Image (tube, rainbow, N blue to C red):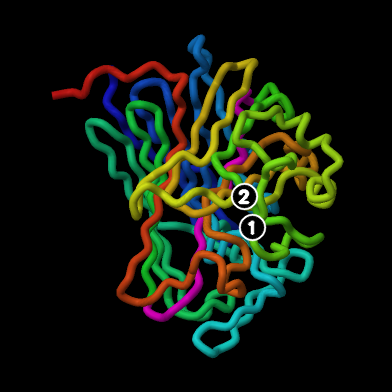
Amino acid sequence: MPLPSVTRSPFGTLPDGTPVARWTLDAGTGVRAEVLDLGGVLHRLDVPDPGGRTATVVLGHDTLGGYTADTAYLGALIGRYANRIAHGRFELDGTAHHVPANDRGHALHGGPDGFHRRPWRATAESGRTRAALRLDLHSPDGDMGFPGALHVTAVYTLERSGTLRLDWTARTDRPTPVNLTHHAYFNLAGPGRTDVLDHRLAVDADAYLPVDAAAIPLGAPVPTVGTPFDLRVPQRLGERLAHPDPQLRRAGGYDHCYVLAPPPAPGALRRAARLHDPDSRRRMEVWTTEPGLQVYTGNGLDGTPHPRHAGVCLETQHFPDAPNRPGYPDTVLRPGTPRHSTTEFRFPHLPAPPGELS
């Protein structure tokens, strides 16, 4: 059985001459991930189905030009602040700050030049039981209006089991709000399927955040019971998206943050979601240390190149607009207290890997 490995190949060159590389993480057991050092994009995630047929389970672009023109954040690392900040304004320790409003009058995913558009410094970190890629990014004081210099490290690790793990670490020299997430669009059926309407989704949460017409939370979490947002038992996405609930009609599908139960211990992983495609029989579980899960059913995809509902995002993160909501989990990062976060994408349908090598 091959050992896990990381290899590098060219993917293109940005207009300013910066080369972009594609890093291939191979678990040695049939699962491979391709990551770009532009935006930390998960370009491909090749996963076998129970019959051994392998296909990528994430949406992407074929060329670098597709990613530089992309407005859907396909597969990207998101920061400094994932999701929305109302009106692009927040106050921190008595000082007002402004982030460019790039979505219906509000700041989305760190502003128009967020981390998804930045080259990251990449370092391979493979071993006998894993293939890993470390990505580092320095965000200077005042970047997109955020205070403080911020250093972020994101480590993709592909285990021999097929689990893809993402570990975040963030450090700052001044107080600043930080909310980091990963924006992969999953379609477990592979490229032959144009939508995820037949996928079954379950979310381990009994509350969510309703939103207004611009996707800004209306206030406190509300129970999901008795609503189409109750996904504690797997539900076919197509049936739920057809429901006349005003929240679903307003967003064109799911684009809402679920409130996850507290972890069993600080920093511990707990399951957040399960996704299943009955045709390919692929299954995925999302485990995380984060307090929230943004479920987004690709409502804004417009066919360039992927059509509406071609994938579903399961974005582990803190809550939208938390810098303006004292009752939400705190997103302010302060000097001397690094923030760590972990999310795992597990594929329980895969056979157990061979025993660990001695």
Residue 186 part of the magenta segment:
yes
* Residue 297 visible to an observer of this rendering: no
Q: Are marks 1 and 2 in contact (CB under 8 Å)?
A: yes
The residue under the point 78% across, 29% down is 239
Segment colored magenta: 173-190
The residue under the point 49% across, 38% down is 286
Mark 1 = which residue?
Answer: 221
Looking at the image, is mark 1 or mark 2 earlier in the sequence?
Answer: 2
In the picture, the disc for residue 356 is: none
The residue under the point 60% across, 72% down is 325
Question: Quarter holding the N terminus?
Answer: top left
Mark 2 = which residue?
Answer: 207
Horizontal arrangement in the rendering, residue 72 relative to residue 39 (left or right) = right
Image coords of residue 293 (percent x, y) = 56, 49
Q: Residue furthest top?
A: 51
Q: Tell me where residue 204 sits by quadrant.
A: top right
Tell me the kind of residue under disc 2: Ala
Tell me the kind of residue under disc 1: Pro
